[in-house]
Amino acid sequence: MCTVVVLRRPDHEWPLILAANRDEALDRPWQPPARHWPDRPEVTAGLDELAGGTWLGVNDHGVVAGILNRHGSLGPAEGYRSRGELPLEALDHADASSAAEALSHLDGDAYRTFNMVVADNEDAYWLRHAGAAHGSSRGVEVLPIPAGVSMITSEDLNDPSFPRVHTYLPRFRKAKVPDPETGDWEEWHRLLASRLHDPEDGPGGAMTIVNEFRDFGTVSSSLIALPFRDAENRRPIWLFAAGGPDKAEFLPIF
């Protein structure tokens, strides 16, 4: 997954809204989010058939977890464990804080570098394993995601030097906020599906990547909303597009 957009509104009836585009090799097999793991019956997540893990999931406690590659670490590598294990480990926990605390003790040397988002309707964190770029190959840093709209890609949270963040973070911040009650996700959907980019940045600067020559692109998209913990008659919402959001229809997972 290459882009996650998070809106945090701690006192709102829908305190967490998340949008995500997954960019991946087009021939890497996967299955849409479902309860794929018999030993984790409380977890709904997409299944990476190659390594057995996931890129994004939600558990029955209302924790959402997603993994992103850091720059220069796309794909598996010999001698490293699959990063797709990590969202599943996060989703073994009943809240985002305990999940983040547990993952902070990981041996970073076992994994290629990554960014990770772990959130619920009260707290949200991004976990950074940046390797030697930040002075340590082992450490996994846990950092809070602030209130408001944030974006994370293969670099740091809200890093304006990354072309996609530079182009799209201001647009998400100005866009009409999704309304889970009425199902109005129109402006965020439009932004997720956008191919707008500076030609000097190449197609990777767009939100939806279409690159037929490299067999790599945006393969799925998600829109997720978590309700306030004690809200009556409200359940988490997950809309999923099994393909690029410029073409595939968003359908409810729950």
Image (cartoon, helix red, strand yellow):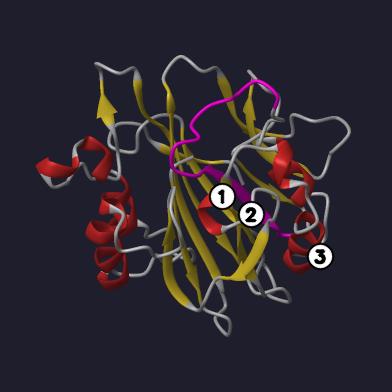
Residue 72 is covered by the magenta coloring:
yes
Q: Which residue is mark 1?
A: 132
Q: Answer with mark 3 or mark 2, whichever residue precedes in sequence.
A: 3
Q: How many marks?
A: 3
Q: Foreground mark, 3 or 2?
A: 2
Residue 98 is covered by the magenta coloring:
no
Closest to the observer, 207 or 133? 133
Closest to the observer, 172 or 242? 172
- The amino acid type of the residue labelled 3 equals Ser
| Residue 98 - label | 3
Q: Whole-Å distance between the Cαs marked 3 and 2?
A: 23 Å
Closest to the observer, 241 or 83? 83
Contact, mark 3 vs mark 1 (Cβ under 8 Å): no
Q: Residue at x 40, y 29 (%)?
A: 243
Q: Whole-Å distance between the Cαs marked 2 and 1?
A: 5 Å
Q: Residue at x 43, y 51 (%)?
A: 153
Q: Which residue is mark 2?
A: 136
Q: Position of residue 78 (x, y in %)?
A: 65, 20
| Residue 105 - label | none
SS state under label 2: loop
Main SS of residues in magenta: loop
SS state under label 1: helix
Contact, mark 2 vs mark 1 (Cβ under 8 Å): yes
Mark yes or no: residue 77 visible.
yes
- The amino acid type of the residue labelled 1 equals Ala
Magenta-highlighted residues: 62-79
Q: Position of residue 250 (x, y in %)?
A: 42, 40
Q: Whole-Å distance between the Cαs marked 3 and 1?
A: 27 Å
Q: Residue at x 65, y 35 (%)?
A: 54
